[in-house]
Image (spheres, rainbow, N blue to C red):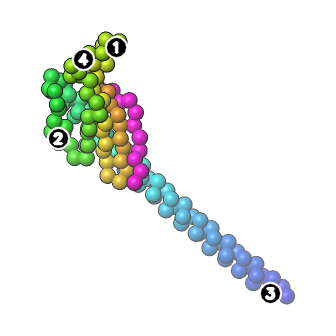
Amino acid sequence: MILLWVMSFLLYLAWTVAQLEAVLALEIQSQAIQVRHQSKFEKAEALLEQCEDQLRTLLIHEADAAEIDFNSLDLEGCRPKLISNFGNSATPNLNNPQITKVRWIEMEVGQGIRLRSVLRYQITSQQLSRINWQILYE
């Protein structure tokens, strides 16, 4: 009887160790996935910042151009798009003259983990500022 009790106790301990190993393996995999995705996110964030800097330079050099050629952004992965261009309005806004000197640009970057930001470019002061950003899920 004692032998049966000891064997069942050892079997229970072996099952517990196997369950613990499975949980630890899943935790290690989870940590590896989290580190990999964190690294991809940081790369996308750095790329977004580089694209914004390059866009800022482009806008400053071509401030007077009616249409800006966004294809000249040679950084791979930058996908800018002009949302609206109030800088060349034929009828200025009398209620708010500042709005006639603003361009809204949407920038999308990344592979796998993609980021999209909306940028506001103040033509008169040549300031580019990020209004918001979001992660795009596939």
Where residue 110 appears, as percent x and y from the top left, is: 31, 48
Under circle 2, the secondary element is: helix
Q: Which residue is mark 1?
A: 96
Which of the two labelled residues, at mark 4 and mark 1, occupies the earlier sequence position?
Answer: 4
Among all residues in the image, which is located at the extreme right?
Answer: 1
What residue range appears in magenta? 126-138
- Between label 4 and label 1, give the one nearer the viewer: 4
> Could you say which disc has been placed on residue 3 in the image?
3
User: How far apart are labels 4 and 1 at the CA level?
Assistant: 12 Å
57 is higher (above) or lower (below) than 108: above
Question: In the rendered structure, which amino acid carries the disc numbered 4?
Answer: Thr
Under circle 4, the secondary element is: loop
Residue 113 at least partly seen: yes
> Could you say which disc has been placed on residue 71 in the image?
2
Q: How many marks?
A: 4
User: How far apart are labels 1 and 3 at the CA level?
Assistant: 90 Å
Question: In the rendered structure, which amino acid carries the disc numbered 2?
Answer: Asn
- Is residue 133 shown in magenta? yes
Q: Is residue 16 left or right of residue 60?
A: right
Which of the two labelled residues, at mark 2 and mark 1, occupies the earlier sequence position?
Answer: 2
Q: Residue at x 35, y 12 (%)?
A: 95
Q: Residue at x 59, y 69 (%)?
A: 21
Under circle 3, the secondary element is: helix
Q: Residue at x 80, y 87 (%)?
A: 3
> Could you say which disc has been placed on residue 91 in the image?
4
Q: Quadrant of the C terminus?
A: bottom left
Question: In the rendered structure, which amino acid carries the disc numbered 1?
Answer: Asn
110 is higher (above) or lower (below) than 126: below
Majority SS type along the magenta span: strand
Front in this rendered view, residue 42 or 1: 42
